[in-house]
Image (tube, rainbow, N blue to C red):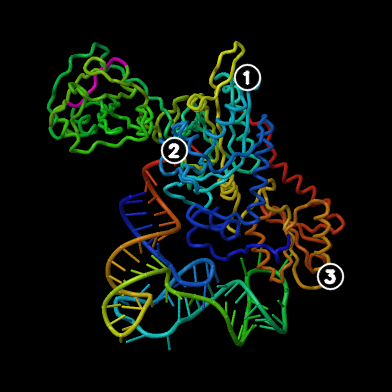
Amino acid sequence: MRMSQRFGKTLRESPAEAELPSHSLMLRAALISKVAAGIYNYMPFAWRSVRKIEDIMRREMDRITGQELNMPVVHPAELWQESGRWYGVGPELIRMKDRSGRDMVLAMTHEETVTDLARRYIDSYKQLPMVVYHIQTKFRDEPRSRAGLIRVREFIMKDAYSFHGYEQGLDEYYPLMCEAYLRICRSCGVPVVQVLGDVGMMGGTNAHEFTYLTESGEDTLLSCPECGYAANRETATIEKGYVPLGDGGEVAGAEKVPTPGMNTIALVGAFLGVDPRETIKTMVYVAKDEAVMVVIRGDLDVNEKKLANRLGVAEVRFAEPDELRARGLVQGYMSPVGVSGMKVVADDSLLGTRGYVAGANEQDFHLRHVMPGRDFTADLTADIAAAREGDPCPVCGGSLCVRRGVEIGNTFKLGTRYSQSMGAGFQDEQGNLKPLVMGCYGMGVGRLLACVIEENHDERGIIWPMSVTPYHVHLVSLGTSDRVKGTAEGVYARLQKIGVEVLYDDRDESAGVKFNDADLLGMPIRVTISERSLKQGGAEVKLRREADSCIVGLNDLDDTLCQLIRKEMSRYTPEEVEQ
RNA sequence: CGGGGAGUGGCGCAGCUUGGUAGCGCGCAUGGUUUGGGACCAUGAGGCCGCAGGUUCAAGUCCUGUCUCCCCGACCA
């Protein structure tokens, strides 16, 4: 490729809209160009990288028996009505009508279409397991796009789907996919951590996210530096410990005590001389118009996402003060003791026999010796506690850290969520009709590209990993003499002939312009041919990621470059990644 | 959807307070001199100042509405 003919040119200044390095560099290097909020053109250089990333994904999917196919972007609404998501998913699903008035949707994911395929073509256990994938456009009308390609509305995704006869089959296959995901990211020069994820609206039983850790990420996760435990904030658990009875005796009967003005856990605890762990915190949430009383040990906080999941609703909100008053509840002095007509959800931190301080449902009064199970009963007891910085790790008890990251991929054990609603079954060895057990696995191509740059750049520009670089070599000629130009042209032709991907800066620009563009564009190897280099014996060869350069004789140049490319490439060849 | 900010040649910005010929840098075109870290000189091209109303003799500038974009939050497989 000749720079003089390149479609797209570099910018000296970063466009005002860019905040993240990856966004700014992609705009300055003319890798992407915005069409609308969250909708981008991929320019030729970026597209070359995209294709290489896709090929890495293909390699890894094929390696674990994936079969590539292609499913459409526009789906008939019927499929989504069958799965139920036509009714459950909000405005992020673009709905439209075709010319005959038929309801259609723009694909935001492909569980429906792939399940439709499975029910047509999978009949027997003999065909299982079956794994298909495609790399294709998705559209999600997100409320807010941000940060260039990190979060967009239209994007390319590699999504794979596996079909199994039994849970056990999925359990056996699932780790292979996780390993493939780690290998893909490693091959692209992006370090990721595998974290426990929330199953969210996808349904299913088990999920992981593959997250690139960066402060500018939008995902929050908790990780344990001691043992490596890592989980999304929405699903992270903590070791809550059990608070034994102070005196080891029996729990006395509940006793009302005056606590004037003590309307927070901290105030009550200090006033009565008890640890917050010996108190019950009571809140009222509203889930789908139903008020729910939520209790948790006083030192802990409620994770609203966990609570919503437990209640089977999309979201919960804090009850308004007048909603509390309408039920005769006094803010700051609430508890489930003596309250009827409301569902009570208790965090499992309140399990066990001991007395707590709780509200008396009366202004300026609390109760001592309140015992869950005796003085009130919960309709549902579950883990609804929020994991916070410094909380004990559920695995080893170490101190959890809050980290931010970008979710590049995710894996789900879907189970029979879609096969059941859409009637995708198979016959087992006994001839019984069973629903297919499914897994689904997504990975964002553009997002991964953005993370490649986010991870691999310096203040001068991009530093492409050899595995996904648009071109292997950036050939720069300096000066306009026939000798220099002729030599550079010859090298350009020869390298192309032996299969090296060369970007040749043949422009009549000053050295500064060319070097700065080379640094910004970031090809891993730069080859400079000038009067000076020829005088020194050949061409100057420099790695983008290193400061030093060396002179290589023109006769040795081809071999040297091929070796260098191979060596650089090997840095991104995945070894077996431990599960 | 809530809070904040911004729309002026391709990019970065000034001009708006106090209405009166639309400017600067980069980029682009042509000619010349340059050529190892964003060269220089000269001459040019390119803008319904987001859009629509209104006020005014006169609106980039004042008023109203509207659209779009960015950031934070909510949301998000």
Where residue B33 sits: x, y (%)? 72, 83
Disc 3 and disc 2 in contact, CB within 8 angstroms: no
- N-term-proximal mark, 2 vs 1: 1
Q: Amino acid at mark 1?
A: Ser
User: Residue A135: where, in percent of width, then height?
Assistant: 61, 41
Query: Disc 3 versus disc 1: distance between alpha carbons?
Result: 70 Å
Q: Count residues near mark 2 (Cα–Cα under 10 Å), then give few for <14, some for 14-19, many for 20+.
A: some
Q: Which residue is mark 1?
A: A124
In this picture, which residue range is highlighted in magenta? Answer: A352-359
Q: Earlier in the sequence, mark 3 or mark 2?
A: 2
Q: Amino acid at mark 3?
A: Arg
Left or right placement of residue A248 versus residue A164 in this view: left
Foreground mark, 2 or 1, reads 1
* CA distance for labels 3 and 2: 59 Å
Please report the residue visible at 63 percent of the width from the left and 26 percent of the height from the top. A130
Disc 3: which residue? A483
